[in-house]
Image (cartoon, rainbow, N blue to C red):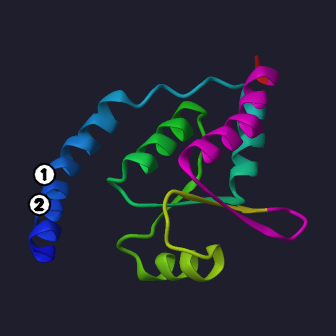
Amino acid sequence: MRILIRTFFRGLRLVLAPVMLASEKLSTPQAIQRSPEAQARVDEACRNLALYQFRSCPFCIKVRKEIARLGLEIELRDAQHDPDHRRELAESGGRVKVPCLKIAHDDGPTEWLYESDDINAWLHRRFATAEAQAA
């Protein structure tokens, strides 16, 4: 019975993944506009960030849409198909759960932020203020 359930959900993922990815492409918002100087500051701040994600995970899609809306250049790391990224997420982050935002602070420590709502709230707090300053 267990193998039947596992096979069913794998098949369901195979069918739904392309639909979800197409939906993401069609519904991703336009990036906010910033002055070139403000965008350069934002891009510099994004160098310390990396998003560990699975391509067709709905929660990862939610975070990628917020990244696009805020006009951020954050490195995307595939923890599903890249064993090195998966290992780093497990060893340094503590668990293989996505989405996970790796935040390397300038003063040394690294923070691992899980949960799509928490990640989106952090991105909004950190980068939406740059939007207001640029306007």
Q: Give the residue furthest to the top.
A: 135
The span picked out in magenta is 105-133
Instruction: Classify 10 Å Cα crowding around label 1: few (below 14), some (14-19), many (20 and above).
Output: few
Given residues 28 and 20, the one toward you in this image is 20
Q: Residue 87 location in percent, x, y?
A: 51, 82
Give the residue at x 73% y 41%.
42
Q: Give the residue furthest to the front.
A: 1
Residue to which mark 2 is pinned: 11
The quadrant of the image that shows the N terminus is bottom left
Q: Is residue 24 left or right of residue 72?
A: left
Q: Residue 132 location in percent, x, y?
A: 77, 21
Q: Secondary structure at mark 1?
A: helix
The answer to whether 36 is drawn above or below residue 79 in the figure is above
Instruction: Classify 10 Å Cα crowding around label 2: few (below 14), some (14-19), many (20 and above).
Output: few
Q: Is residue 114 left or right of residue 30?
A: right
Labels 1 & 2 near each other (Cβ < 8 A)? yes
Q: Within the magenta stretch, is there residue 132?
A: yes
Q: Is residue 93 left or right of residue 86?
A: right
Q: Residue 76 location in percent, x, y?
A: 50, 58
Q: Main secondary structure of the magenta part?
A: helix
The answer to whether 135 is drawn above or below residue 77 in the figure is above
Q: Is residue 74 left or right of residue 57?
A: right
User: Mark 2 belongs to which amino acid?
Assistant: Gly
Number of numbered tags placed on the structure image? 2
Q: Which mark is residue 15?
A: 1
Q: CA distance from mark 1 to mark 2?
A: 6 Å
User: Mark 1 belongs to which amino acid?
Assistant: Val
Give the residue at x 17% y 61%.
9
Q: Within the magenta stretch, is there residue 65?
A: no
